[in-house]
Image: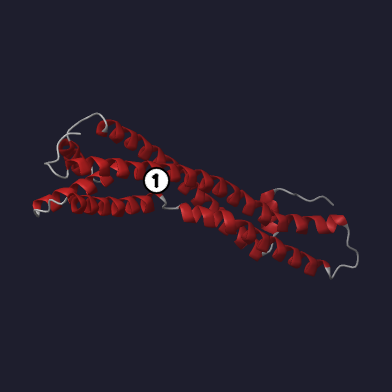
Amino acid sequence: MTHDFSIVELMLNASWVVQAVVVVLLGVSVTSWAAIFRKIFALKRVRRLTDDFERAFWSGGHLQDLYAAAARNAHVGSPMERIFASGMREFQKLRERRINQPDALLDGARRAMRAAYQRELDALEVNLSFLGSVGSVSPYIGLFGTVWGIMHAFTGLAALTQVTLATVAPAIAEALVATAIGLFAAIPAVLAYNRFAHDIDRLANRLETFIEEFSNILHRHAGAAPAGH
């Protein structure tokens, strides 16, 4: 007697619990791949916009011109541009209130930039925890399906008087498919999570460095009207 060991045939013959586990894992895998591609394009866009703004900022232009452009690009600009706009907005608000102490002006601008920095970091980390969860949980979900499938297989074999490898192999293969699909879902998610976490850390360091550098510029302008740097 021959058996068809294709994955589709094995799944059709598997127990309903194993089938449900496989369906869940396939759904999780598709969702995680969609999140991976969205994050790849999003981070690529953020890096490009950040490079563009950084070049414009250090080109020696007028701070007011940069602020006006950042205000127009509030929803489509880079995280660095929005952090810059938050700092400039608070700096100008404090000056309009006749607050002229350099330390008070700088502290207010830095607090605004830090709040904007945290918002931007939260936005960059969207879907990162999902990928981490997929990478850590999927193998266990697959293992649960495998254990259940093996238990179901042995229960069915208990009624047989003669058990051979030919009778055991199909049932064991059906159960092991769940573990294989669990690994198929987990491995790309883990690799993507580690890569994205590294890229986000590098962007976070760039943003923190910019906050410090821009704070120094604002400190120099704290005693005078903000002009070009």
Residue farthest to the right?
A: 162
Vertical position of residue 67 compared to residue 151: above or below: above
Residue 120 horizontal side relative to residue 201, left or right:
left
Label 1 environment density (alpha carbons within 10 Å; few <14, some 14–19, many ≥20): some
Question: In the image shown, does 2 or 69 lie closer to the viewer?
Answer: 69
- The structure residue drawn at horizontal position 49% and vertical position 56%, both measured from the top left corner, is 130
Question: In the image shown, does 82 or 227 lie closer to the viewer?
Answer: 227
- The structure residue drawn at horizontal position 46% and vertical position 52%, both measured from the top left corner, is 128
Question: In the image shown, does 23 or 63 lie closer to the viewer?
Answer: 63
- Count numbered badges in the picture: 1
Spot occupied by residue 32 in the image (x, y as percentages of width and height): 50, 50
Residue at disc 1, secondary structure:
helix
Vertical position of residue 187 compared to residue 143: above or below: above
Spot occupied by residue 172 in the image (x, y as percentages of width and height): 77, 58
Amino acid type at circle 1 is Ala
- The structure residue drawn at horizontal position 23% and vertical position 40%, both measured from the top left corner, is 217
Q: Quadrant of residue 139?
A: bottom right
Assign the C terminus to one quadrant of the image. top left
Q: Which residue is mark 1?
A: 204
Residue farthest to the top?
A: 59
Residue 1 horizontal side relative to residue 195, left or right:
right
Q: Identify the coloring.
A: secondary structure
Spot occupied by residue 219 in the image (x, y as percentages of width and height): 22, 44
Spot occupied by residue 10 in the image (x, y as percentages of width and height): 70, 54
- Residue 208 visible in rendering: yes
Residue 176 horizontal side relative to residue 199, left or right:
right
- Residue 27 visible in rendering: no
- The structure residue drawn at horizontal position 15% and vertical position 38%, both measured from the top left corner, is 64
